[in-house]
Image: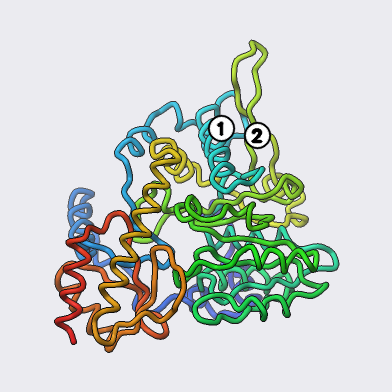
Amino acid sequence: MGSYVPSTKAEREEMLSKVGVADVKGLYAAVPSEMMVDSLDIPAGMSELEVASKVSGMAKKNKLFDAIFRGAGAYNHYIPSIVKQVTSKEEFITTYTPYQAEVSQGVLQNIFEYQTMICELTDMDVSNASVYDGASAAAEAVTMCVERKRSKMIVSGAVNPMYIQTIKTYCEGADREVVIAPVKDGVTDMEALAALIDDATAGVLLQQPNYFGMIEDAAAAGEAAHAKKAKFVMAVDPIAITVLKSPRECGADIVVGEGQSLGIPLSFGGPYLGFMACKKELMRKLPGRIVGQTVDHDGRRAFVLTLQAREQHIRREKATSNICSNEALCAMMAAVYMTAMGTKGITDCANLCYSKAHYAAAQISAIPGYELVNNGEFFNEFVTRVPDADKALAALEEKGILGGYPVDGGILWCVTEMNSKDQIDELVSILKGVN
């Protein structure tokens, strides 16, 4: 078996030494200790049937909630039953890596349709074959902005913290500066943002709606970036942008986001997909793959890989990204969801999220001690102060309700079309009983 091990013990120790950790566990230092498992409690010598039963019992420890009022990057939306039906069809599950177009038509068509819909959704010219998640997409967009004399990135402090951490990780290794623009009243301080942009700035990144659910003045950020010849990146919620100004209207050069809302189950945190789209002039900087439509020698509709980033093949040391997967199954889920819902369906979903969130915000903020933290327009998330967050969330959990996400200053609540008026009223009733 030794010949099948890709590296020797000495080589692994040398690699660990180079990155400054004593052992493999040191690579996971950022993971909270309570989430680490040394080994599963499975006795040796058990049969496959016995192991399956044992693991199923462990899985029952996962708690499923009757109602969810938490977002912060992952959202509970309705998924039409046709999504699962279509994504399991054999004609779309062809060769995973579609280098040979003649045997990969199913996955190539899936990617082509997905890219087309992402372009329509974002009002951009070109989309790639999807990346790992929204945070990775944001970090890849930063790389797209960088030029020889411009490497500094201005990122709003109201962007999802996981996006900011990922961007910093990408930029640290490339010796690029990341500057966080201050937040004022729950939104980006536009005056401070504009003052930070200079001739060394490669791009400005803003989230719409932002991490706190607030609707930003994205057009102003775009104007400030372009005034200094920097690029403007928008990280967007794909449901929300159907009722807000399109990224192109706001001056975006690159649009990224998390596609989980587009028909992908929460699944305890993944897998998800990140979407990326941009203006045509940036097409060759877009990582990953771009699928195009053509005809074969008999004149029949066919699909091919039109453009592939350099890291997929040779000269990897020259690559500007390391996206080597197209998240094909998740992209297909998103494509089928968008097809099934249509423009009207997704817009109706957005309007329901907006109206239900505003009803919930009014009811929750009427409880003594639960006033809204930020004044301004929001989409389907909002922050309220709370007398005791732990106590409130524990009381909700007892009743089968997953409450909002604790943040500085209170709780970040999320309401989607999945939350009924009765659920909202029950949540409010429980919170009243906690005080």
Question: Residue farthest to the top?
Answer: 298
State the image coordinates of residue 5 (x, y, percent, origin top left).
54, 56
The amino acid pointed to by label 2 is Leu
**For residue 133, which numbered disc appears in the image?**
none
Kind of element beneath mark 1: helix
Identify the residue at image location x=38%, y=76%: 383
Identify the residue at image location x=46%, y=30%: 92
Is residue 191 left or right of 352 when viewed as pictured? right
State the image coordinates of residue 418 (x, y, percent, origin top left).
28, 55
Is residue 162 left or right of 78 when viewed as pictured? right
The amino acid pointed to by label 1 is Leu
Identify the residue at image location x=30%, y=72%: 362
Q: Quadrant of residue 293?
A: top right
Question: Which sits in the foreground, 145 or 240?
Answer: 240
The answer, for residue 18, to whether it is visible in the render is yes
Kind of element beneath mark 2: strand
Question: Which sits in the foreground, 148 or 40?
Answer: 148
Q: Locate the C terminus by quadrant.
A: bottom left
In space, the residues marked 1 and 2 are separated at their CA atoms by 8 Å
Is residue 108 left or right of 126 when viewed as pictured? left
Identify the residue at image location x=63%, y=58%: 250
Question: Residue farthest to the right?
Answer: 149
State the image coordinates of residue 369 (x, y, percent, origin top left).
28, 87
- Classed neighbour count for the residue bearing mark 1: other residues with Cα under 10 Å, few (<14), some (14–19), many (≥20): many
Up-down relation of residue 265 to residue 228 (above or below): above
Question: Which sits in the foreground, 13 or 135?
Answer: 135
The answer, for residue 43, to whether it is visible in the render is no
- In the picture of the structure, the residue carrying the numbered disc 2 is 305
Which one is earlier in the sequence, the residue at label 1 or at label 2? 1
Up-down relation of residue 190 to residue 301 (above or below): below
- In the picture of the structure, the residue carrying the numbered disc 1 is 108
Q: Quadrant of residue 428?
A: bottom left
